[in-house]
């Protein structure tokens, strides 16, 4: 627990000194809790002395007492307020920064990072995990450190009247610490299992929601729900196990403190009976024995929570240690957009996908990439946009190795239109604006007009303010495609990478989409994963990929006269297009 607390304190970074100030306020708060008790005992002593005729009390004393009490109460509330102000905002501030840091990191890592970490783990980290830390971290630090500081202040006051009572209180604290250590040991063992079960729940739920159409179509609700149920069962089991181990340790911890409180009261009574302690002092120690461990009693929760927070911090550290793909890049402007791949090799993990790939795409020309499914067409595009780094060889734009650019300075030159369009759960206007956030509404509409989607947008009841379902679920394939083209039009980057997804679009929509694409690509350097014969035939260059290698390169005219994959591919396409026309 102490290790996790130290990590949490370090985690607060620059705000660490606020925490330390908070500890000082906790100490003063405890003193201002103890002092009224001591004050009352003192006054009691005076009253007894007065009644036994040893002294004569002056009436003004009651006024002093009242003033003292009011001051103590005010002081206590003031320090409690200061402690809360100094400590409690830290958690919110640090987690907000942490979320932004993670967002920034995710923007700059390679896509391979997302293959190594599950969506559930990532979503869990920025939602439930960080919220947990936000809610509990500072409270728990305050409970533990504030609790022990408070107890130390009270024991100090006890020692002033009876060293025996102080020693007993210390023994009680030590025994409770032992029980807490045992609790920490169990929690430490269970926390990663708890975390894993939580990630499984998020993964299973996301999987279910994403695949709900397929699940319904195949009538497999039962099987899909089963994986969610199994995740919930695992979490239930680990929670029960945690509770079972927690309860005995907790009982031991509370017993040690309560027994020590009772022993303080008992020893004080003995001392009073033997004349070693006045009656008012005895009464005061008895009151102390009830309040001394007030906050320490709650440290049991902190021990448990700290053990959950430990693996969360591990996970956040793991995400934060992700290497930025553009660590060595510089912000540079490009003025030539000729793309070149030289002897490029690439593998996902260990599976080699591309080998010895070399080609040049002169600026303002169109290059079509064709090849069988899985041959690596999308992978080539991903390497040009530096979603991944090449394993060998290099990719240059305008003669500059793209590894020498920051991602921002590279990607501002590239517009991408993907086969699987993703639209955000936001208005249509904002989805288009994503291409250039500072664009005016007029510019958004102009891009939409060129992308042939203005009309259908204005036909919607809320026009550009129409909310799009997550992933674009409330629009047709062709509509989504045109909105994504409008987004790219607004960006107006000199290089356009296009996954020409025509298969899922009906002929009427296809014509609109083609018109939109022509408007987008006019005068740009274009790389297109081509499916339509017209695109392939009109390209300035065709790259034919097979088994991760470029097996043919040239214009349609040149390649049609060569024996090889291209001729075969074209004949299949011709048949397919005849079919779709027929
Ligand atoms: N993130 C990934 N991790 C591991 N393997 C991947 C990943 N993405 C793609 N692959 C594999 O790499 C190979 C090439 O994929 P790629 O998407 O580049 O092919 P493609 O030619 O564009 O295919 P299609 O025409 O079907 O879209 C495929 O075998 C695919 O399974």
Image (cartoon, grey):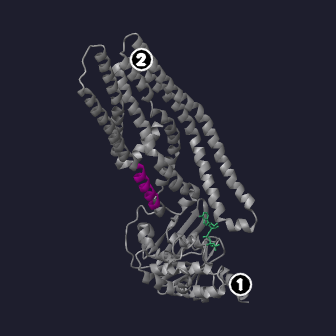
**24 vs 545: above or below:** above
Q: What's the CA distance linking mark 1 and mark 2?
A: 97 Å
According to the image, label 2 marks what residue? 268
Q: Residue furthest top?
A: 274
Assess disc 1: are there few (<14), some (14-19) or many (≥20) residues with their C-alpha within 10 Å of its C-alpha: few
Q: Which residues are magenta?
A: 90-104
Q: Which residue is drawn at the image coordinates 59% and 34% (left, top)?
A: 247
Determine if the magenta segment contains residue 575. Answer: no
Q: Quadrant of the C terminus?
A: bottom right
Q: Measured from the top left, where is residue 460 in percent x and y?
A: 56, 82
Q: Measured from the top left, where is residue 164 in percent x and y?
A: 40, 17
Dividing the image into four quarters, tell me where ligand 1 lies.
bottom right
Determine if the magenta segment contains residue 103. Answer: yes
Determine which of the numbered discs, if any, sits on residue 576 in the image: 1
Q: Which residue is drawn at the image coordinates 64% and 77% (left, top)?
A: 371
Q: Is residue 442 left or right of residue 209?
A: left
Q: Which residue is drawn at the image coordinates 28% and 29% (left, top)?
A: 65
Q: Measured from the top left, where is residue 194 in percent x and y?
A: 59, 45
**439 vs 269: above or below:** below
Q: Is residue 467 left or right of residue 30?
A: right
**170 vs 373: above or below:** above
**Residue 427 vs residue 490, the one in the foreground:** 427
Q: Which residue is drawn at the image coordinates 49% and 52% (left, top)?
A: 130
Q: Is residue 546 left or right of residue 75?
A: right
Q: Callout 1: helix, strand or loop?
A: helix
Q: Residue furthest right?
A: 219
Is residue 313 at least partly visible in the picture?
yes
Number of the front mark, 1 or 2: 2
Q: Callout 2: helix, strand or loop?
A: helix
């Amino acid at each position: 627990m102490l290790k996790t607390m130290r990590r949490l304190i370090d985690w607060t970074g620059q705000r660490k000194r606020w925490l330390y100030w908070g500890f000082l306020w906790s100490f003063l708060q405890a003193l201002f809790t103890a002092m009224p008790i001591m004050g009352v005992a003192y006054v009691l002593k005076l009253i007894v002395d007065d009644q036994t005729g040893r002294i004569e009390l002056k009436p003004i004393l009651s006024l002093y007492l009242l003033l003292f009490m009011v001051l103590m109460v005010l002081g206590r509330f003031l320090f409690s307020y200061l402690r809360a102000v100094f400590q409690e905002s830290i958690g919110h501030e640090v987690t907000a920064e942490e979320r932004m840091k993670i967002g920034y990191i995710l923007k700059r890592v390679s896509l391979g990072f997302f293959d190594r970490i599950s969506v559930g783990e990532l979503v869990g980290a920025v939602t439930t995990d960080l919220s947990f830390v936000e809610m509990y971290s500072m409270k728990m630090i305050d409970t533990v450190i504030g609790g022990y500081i408070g107890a130390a202040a009270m024991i100090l006051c006890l020692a002033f009247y009876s060293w025996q009572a102080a020693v007993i209180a210390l023994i009680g604290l030590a025994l409770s610490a032992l029980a807490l250590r045992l609790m920490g040991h169990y929690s430490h063992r269970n926390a990663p299992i708890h975390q894993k079960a939580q990630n499984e729940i998020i993964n299973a739920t996301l999987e279910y929601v994403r695949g709900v159409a397929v699940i319904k179509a195949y009538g497999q609700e039962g099987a899909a729900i089963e994986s969610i149920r199994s995740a919930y069962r695992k979490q239930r089991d680990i929670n029960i196990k945690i509770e079972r181990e927690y309860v005995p340790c907790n009982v031991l911890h509370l017993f040690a403190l309560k027994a020590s409180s009772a022993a303080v009261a008992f020893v004080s009574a003995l001392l009073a009976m033997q004349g070693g302690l006045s009656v008012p002092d005895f009464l005061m120690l008895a009151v102390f024995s009830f309040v001394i461990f007030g906050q320490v009693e709650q440290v049991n929760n902190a021990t448990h929570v700290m053990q959950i927070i430990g693996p969360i911090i591990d996970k956040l550290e793991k995400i934060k240690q992700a290497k930025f793909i553009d660590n060595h890049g510089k912000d540079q402007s490009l003025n030539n957009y000729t793309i070149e791949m030289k002897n490029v090799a690439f593998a996902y993990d260990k599976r080699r996908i591309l080998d010895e790939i070399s080609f040049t795409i002169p600026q303002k020309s169109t290059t079509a990439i064709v090849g069988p499914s899985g041959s690596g067409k999308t992978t080539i595009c991903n390497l040009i946009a530096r979603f991944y780094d090449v394993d060998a060889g290099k990719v240059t734009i305008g003669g500059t190795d793209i590894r020498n650019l920051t991602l921002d300075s590279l990607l501002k030159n590239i517009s991408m239109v993907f086969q699987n369009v993703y639209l955000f759960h936001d208005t249509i206007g904002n989805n288009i604006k994503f291409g250039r956030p500072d664009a005016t509404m007029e510019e958004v509409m102009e891009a939409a007009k060129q992308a042939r989607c203005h009309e259908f947008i204005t036909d919607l009841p809320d026009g550009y303010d129409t909310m799009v379902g997550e992933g674009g679920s409330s629009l047709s394939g062709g509509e989504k495609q045109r909105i994504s083209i409008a987004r790219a039009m607004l960006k107006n980057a000199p290089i356009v990478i296009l996954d020409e997804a025509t298969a899922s679009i009906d002929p009427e929509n296809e014509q609109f989409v083609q018109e939109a694409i022509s408007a987008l690509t006019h005068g740009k350097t274009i790389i297109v994963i081509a499916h339509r014969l017209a695109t392939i035939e009109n390209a300035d260059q065709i790259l034919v990929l097979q088994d991760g290698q470029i097996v043919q390169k040239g214009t349609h005219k040149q390649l049609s006269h060569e024996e090889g994959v291209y001729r075969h591919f074209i004949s299949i396409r011709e048949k397919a297009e005849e079919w779709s026309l027929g």
